[in-house]
């Protein structure tokens, strides 16, 4: 009987499939909770991982986007990405529990693509009313509120946000600044 598909990985085969050195992968899997934190090197080397659970992990790491590249990918400023990260709107592949816990912060392409999809699903800005609308960053600078609050409200449908078809990502989000500032002042 010929084996046609792999159902399990050892730490060594997983290391070679992911392209991450075995000791580093072992630490990573401990941080993700896939390996018990108190597991010895020998015990870890003898562990077996199901392909169904590890293939998404492999795919996530092979297509991961480093933090420094996320602003370009999301069409946002570095500051906006830092705010989205701090607010938990975008999550790194490896959770960061304490300062210095993860050296190279990377984000899963799937999560970022889902966020971009939600932005592109916003109503397209009608060019006849375009003069009343400005980028979300401009609205925040003019007193409409904190970026993360407005961003979340737009994605949840609590605040009207529109998408400029010729732009992409966060830079494509346009809002009516006057109405946002008026709502904030009345509250």
Image (spheres, rainbow, N blue to C red):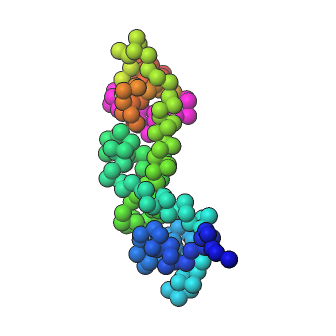
The residue sitting at 51% across, 31% down in the picture is 121
Magenta includes 154? yes
Of residues 149 and 157, the one nearer the viewer is 157
- Magenta stretch, main secondary structure, is helix
Asked if residue 87 can be seen in this view, the reply is no
Segment colored magenta: 136-158
37 shown above or below 85? below
Magenta includes 149? yes
54 shown above or below 158? below
Whole-percent x, y for residue 181 in the image: 41, 23
Q: Using the rendered view, name the quadrant where residue 139 is placed.
A: top left
The residue sitting at 46% across, 54% down in the picture is 108
Taking the view exactly as shown, the residue that stands out farthest to the bottom is 42
Q: Using the rendered view, name the quadrant where residue 163 is placed.
A: top left
Q: Is residue 177 left or right of residue 29?
A: left
Whole-percent x, y for residue 101 in the image: 41, 68
The residue sitting at 44% across, 20% down in the picture is 125
Whole-percent x, y for residue 119 in the image: 47, 34
């Amino acid at each position: 009987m010929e084996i046609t598909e792999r159902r399990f990985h050892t730490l060594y085969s997983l290391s070679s499939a992911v392209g991450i050195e075995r000791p580093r992968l072992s630490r990573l899997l401990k941080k993700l909770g896939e390996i018990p934190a108190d597991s010895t090197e020998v015990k870890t080397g003898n562990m077996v991982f199901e392909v169904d659970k590890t293939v998404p992990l492999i795919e996530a790491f092979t297509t991961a986007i480093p933090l420094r590249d996320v602003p370009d990918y999301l069409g946002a400023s570095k500051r906006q990405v830092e705010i989205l990260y701090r607010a938990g709107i975008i999550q790194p592949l490896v959770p960061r529990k304490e300062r210095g816990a993860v050296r190279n912060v990377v984000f899963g392409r799937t999560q970022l693509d889902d966020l971009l999809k939600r932005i592109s699903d916003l109503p397209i800005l009608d060019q006849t009313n375009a003069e009343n609308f400005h980028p979300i960053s401009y609205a925040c600078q003019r007193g409409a509120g904190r970026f993360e609050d407005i961003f979340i409200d737009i994605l949840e449908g609590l605040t009207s946000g529109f998408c400029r078809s010729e732009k992409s990502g966060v830079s494509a989000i346009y809002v009516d600044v006057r109405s946002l500032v008026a709502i904030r002042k009345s509250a």
